[in-house]
Image: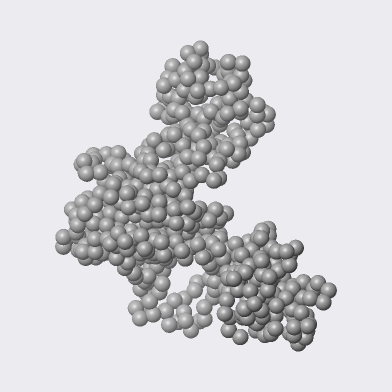
Amino acid sequence: MKRTHNCAELDLSHLDKTVILNGWVNKWRDHGGLIFIDLRDRYGITQVVFNPELNAQAYEQSKSLRSEYVIAVQGCVSKRPQESVNPKIKTGQIEVLVTQLDILNKAKTTPFEITNGLDLNEELRLKYRYLDLRRQGLQQKIIMRSKIYKLIRDFLEGCDFVEVETPILMKSTPEGARDFLVPSRNYPGRFYALPQSPQTYKQLLMISGFDKYFQIVKCFRDEDLRKDRQPEFTQIDIEMSFIDEDDIISLASNLIKNLFKETLNISVTLPIVRMSFNEAYETYGTDKPDLRFDLSIKKLNNIFSGTEFKVFKDVIDSNGHVAGIRVPDGANFPRNRIDDLADKAKMFGAKGLAWAKYQESDFNSGISKFFGQNEKKELINQFNLSEDDLIIIVADKYEVTFDVLGQLRLLLAEELNIIKSDEYKFVWITDFPLLEFSEEENRYVARHHPFTSPKQDQYDILESDPSKAIARAYDLVLNGNEIAGGSIRIHTKKMQEKMFDVLKIDKEEAESKFGFLMRALDFGAPPHGGIAFGLDRLIMLLTQSESIRDVIAFPKTASALSLMDDSPSDVSAKQLRELRIKII
């Protein structure tokens, strides 16, 4: 029996019509001579009723049905009795009185119930992912993902972009995470790499004259995993020619506005606020600030410039930084809670945590005995203190001070329950440092990638003081998550060679890794730049999911294992011989 309708389609307009439904048995109930089945497909649920007076054979068959049996039923649409109307489902006013039943497939007892809201072990869910995907909540997220793909394509094609697929097997050009390598059978001892991004290919497309390119693309990184990181992930990859930062930021902002309006009916106000890297780091302790709550960091070096408190004095004298956070009503914290914050600060990398309570219009406890009257007055003004506030202070090297306070800020926001979960706060972060010095490699490395252009007035700084060079780069942050990042690229061979010199990539290495791109730059490369959205993370935020694994159909675990099909797996000795590979 081929279905005529899905399990969310029937309503009172179909009364007395004969229909055929196909699906899975969601629930089975015997109500004294009548058997009720909730029949489920990806669209929804319809109640079907087996009555021996309508068809005794179908009724007897229905007694053998169990959860997750696959069945087809034919019957007549009938109005439910008023007392059994179910307003929670689309088909809640009708039921189908079955006249014919066909059991298409039986099912073993499932390892977990196919329903929403269960607190399930994630490893069990991933092992039986095909069953997990039957749950309506998870299905809706995958369906949302499909809708977002279409919205992206429609929006970008409407802006005259061309979708181009780039290779999955490519040259290994390691300049970021570790590549996944693919051995070549035809060329023993040589390897392809899976792309960490289509970076060089999209630049080549700009040189080819495709001035507006996009791709929804798989990327691969063989790196140490975190909670929300996958070895393979999806990007919305965008590149444009003859543009500047404002053009790309405007396009990406409008794409986001369109996605949020079409999926959540939320209006994103444009233009999205911009914030420099330094401002973000010194105010929120991160380049991915969550703006749904305050708890901003205040710099305190000026206040304590003449302090006699040795800890602060030594840090300031050694060009370190003193900074702090105001914790509303934190003066009421018990001492063990403050001690726990101090322990967390040490765990995050600080040597310790200073603190003081503000009560009865004065400071007490903690380090307040070291405050002079003028310092007290300036602290009150700087933090805009109110009765029963607590200030916590870190004094250390620049990176340690702001990084630790940034982590404490997030920790306190969760503990104080002040994060507004129903808000979406966007911010563009700009003016990143172009380079950072690697103590391990004893050289400068690119903060983004080696093709990022410095600000146009800073080319000479690359030779005189590379640490001060500012990148033409930008990240889009949503609720403390980086959802997109990009840059204006270097488009002249001369500038690219200078960048390689600064990065201590010699001519032989540059030719080996990037010779094809350098040759292409000789043939009239236009000014160009782009951006890439982390699509998995964006969909996770749009669907308010706990993890990106909830919005990927067949994800890996946090340790990069596929529990469902047991990959990675061993391969045969014959396969290894063909590839000239020996396992040692």
Residue 242, by quadrant, is: bottom left
Residue 522, by quadrant, is: bottom left
Going by the picture, which residue comes out furthest to the left? Answer: 523
- What residue is shown at x 81% (from left), y 72% (from top)? 31
Colouring convention used in this rendered image of the protein: one colour
Going by the picture, which residue comes out furthest to the bottom? Answer: 57
The count of marks equals 0
Of residue 47 and residue 157, the one placed in the foreground of this image is 47
- What residue is shown at x 53% (from left), y 67% (from top)? 553
Of residue 226 and residue 65, the one placed in the foreground of this image is 65
As drawn, is 437 to the left or to the right of 298?
Answer: left
- What residue is shown at x 77% (from left), y 86% (from top)? 56
Residue 119, by quadrant, is: bottom right
Of residue 193 and residue 562, the one placed in the foreground of this image is 562
Compared to residue 107, the image places residue 44 above or below, namely above
As drawn, is 182 to the left or to the right of 124?
Answer: left
Horizontal and vertical percent position of residue 169: 36, 71
Quadrant in which the N terminus appears = bottom right
Compared to residue 98, the image places residue 433 above or below, namely above
Would residue 101 be visible to someone looking at this image? yes
- What residue is shown at x 40% (from left), y 51% (from top)? 257
